[in-house]
Amino acid sequence: MRIILVGFGVVGQNLVKLLLSRTDDIYARYGMKPRIVATLDSKGAVVCPSGLNLQRLLEVKRVYGTVAAYDDRYEVGEQEKQYMDSTSLEVSSSDDDDYNNNNNNNRVEEIVRSVDAEVLVEATPTNLKDGEPGLSNIITAIKHGKNIITVNKGPLALAMPSLLELAEYNGVILRFSGTVGGGTPILEFAKHCLKGDRILSFKGILNGTTNYILSMMEEEGFTFDEALNDARGKGYAEADPSLDIDGLDAAAKLVIMANWIMDLKITMRDVRFKGIRDVSLNDILEAKKHGKVIKLIASCDESRRLSVEPMLIDKGEPLCVNGTLNAVTFKSEHSGELTVIGKGAGGMETASAILRDLIEVRETMSIGMGVGLGRS
Amino acid sequence: MRIILVGFGVVGQNLVKLLLSRTDDIYARYGMKPRIVATLDSKGAVVCPSGLNLQRLLEVKRVYGTVAAYDDRYEVGEQEKQYMDSTSLEVSSSDDDDYNNNNNNNRVEEIVRSVDAEVLVEATPTNLKDGEPGLSNIITAIKHGKNIITVNKGPLALAMPSLLELAEYNGVILRFSGTVGGGTPILEFAKHCLKGDRILSFKGILNGTTNYILSMMEEEGFTFDEALNDARGKGYAEADPSLDIDGLDAAAKLVIMANWIMDLKITMRDVRFKGIRDVSLNDILEAKKHGKVIKLIASCDESRRLSVEPMLIDKGEPLCVNGTLNAVTFKSEHSGELTVIGKGAGGMETASAILRDLIEVRETMSIGMGVGLGRS
């Protein structure tokens, strides 16, 4: 299975590490040989139709800061001659954290058009304003008949119904397991584990940063600002934490869940959301007196109303998890309330969700082609 | 899809109610028309190759106490003539709670041999001594090429490796979702949601009765006997609660999980188990002082050691659920700890697990036959 990996940040690098460490096992268990035939970061790209050397790719990124250095600057010994057919494309100037949209999209289009691959993995940073560069990358891939796996929430939050439709129309598979819950298979649980039953509603803690802040306020008596600084210090909050704190990140995940699990056709505009800036230590201590806690809850109720807001919940509820954990409780028609809990983020965790999607794409392709699970 | 339903107690009746309430929806969503062509309880059987009238079946059971009365005693009006082709077989004497093994097995064999059906649903009471009558029923069905769905833990706890092998050898599907966690899809979660990842170990609260008793001791300060009586009063404990209290029920579920999820080949004899009889109120109060609780934990550790025993766990752990809830925490290689929580029992919940298995059997059959998902 040939993969174009767009975005070579924490998740992209962890995916490569994961594929490296599991090569034999993935082949033995799933008959799948994933090869990365092209990858790009904000500074450039490298293409190798026979498959990039993953160990070298990691090393080049570490040493030179961009995958574009893959074959130019690396010292080539006898054993590396096989990789000489790779070509790299460098960009003159661009910041590592700041994808240059036009350049990036043009380069992705060039690669998608010229390189044979079954799947494009979209792992550029999430942007909830206009979804770029992920949105254009996904549309380009769909139009060129590539299956897509994205861990980028932006394009889905803003245009999931259209993207699913476009993918179906073009006969490609679009998967996004890693966009909700990191490695915790929340979407799979709802979609595959409850066959025959019906999910009536769900509610969840979908953002680890805000859950950490609220947990520290409750457990340690921190004020909001103290808890936010603590979260920053531990690397749980970004320099600009507004996407988390104002509820946008949770709302984006709610959009993805509602489309996928409840078959709604909605985008961010359909979610009423409110963050945790106004939650005071006093509110939390008052709730605590009554055996309650305040959590930022994303919910889809039985009338399909979608909201993200701080809510009081019972301390004894399975949903009531602390720290950076995520949790979702599904109310089903016949099996009662079912809760799934796990880490909501993490590079390796999210990479494991990509691998899960790769296996599913592979299996779906095999069934679709009417053949057995041949090996490729 | 033609079904032989063996056992018409709480779960069997709830399955019929579920099929009745969801007929159109199941056809629309899964292209499946489940028909019960034969069923039997401890007092007799009824066969109708074109499909029993489910509404009438429930009514006959309610009024006469056995499905054998289906066509003999019921007043037949004009509109019921279509059901006149059914035949019933009565047994002279046997208690409703006490399946007469030889009679039951002979009758099952007679039905399996003479009635066309794709699936046998085994829903007789669990027996952890010799697995009967379920064990013989399952073997009979396998030998006659019927797929099997069982909610009966006994046969699996005592002979799961052989039964899986026998089923594979005979080309039939054996499923048992409802044996662990009632309607909570614990087995599905572990088997299907973590593709590409690896489960290293797991631990869980698999028995609702003992969890209720321990929760009441901790929350209400009840002694063990007081809590047991309370559980009996609420219908959570049997007259003879030893299967629950001595850890056998949890051990049986652990055997099923270890075989299915970890690919071990083990039976009850390989599990070291200890119940909760020796847990005193004092132990629990002492633990509480240190933020801990005592739970009956079934576990499979990284060395594949299997045990059921009362253990101290942190009150803040996701696994720490109260009341009759069940919970399992899986430790995965790449996605960290993942916890699933839900009701562990209940007639309708377990029936929903059977429906889930029916859909899976149907889908597997369709793939196996190399055809699309035709409707039947």
Image (spheres, coloured by chain):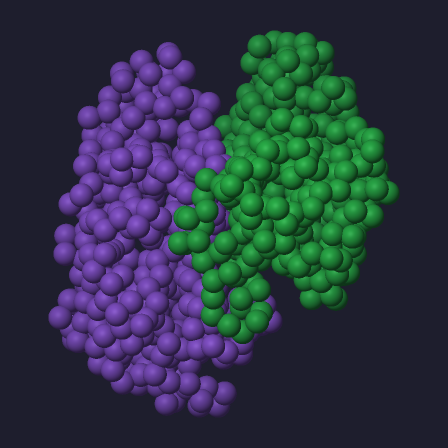
Chain colours: A green, B purple
Q: Residue furthest front?
A: A78
Residue B261: x %, y % from top left: 35, 48
Q: Is residue A367 left or right of residue B182?
A: right
Q: Is residue A126 visible?
A: no
Q: Is residue B286 visible?
A: yes
Measured along the vertical axis of the image, is residue A175 above or below residue B149? above
A189 and A93: which is toward the camera: A93
Q: Which image quadrant: the N terminus of chain B?
A: bottom left
Measured along the vertical axis of the image, is residue A327 above or below residue B117? above
Residue A66: x %, y % from top left: 69, 33
Q: Is residue B120 left or right of residue A171?
A: left
B83 and B248: which is toward the camera: B248
How many numbered callouts? Answer: 0
> At 65% from the left edge and 38% from the top edge, which residue is drawn?
A70
Q: Residue furthest right?
A: A102
Q: Quadrant of residue B30?
A: bottom right
> At 65% from the left edge and 39% from the top edge, which residue is drawn?
A71
Q: Is residue B330 left or right of residue A8?
A: left
> At 86% from the left edge and 43% from the top edge, which residue is drawn?
A102
Q: Is residue A70 left or right of residue B231?
A: right
Residue A73: x %, y % from top left: 66, 33
> At 83% from the left edge and 48% from the top edge, which residue is drawn?
A106
A342 and A291: which is toward the camera: A342
Residue B204: x %, y % from top left: 36, 37
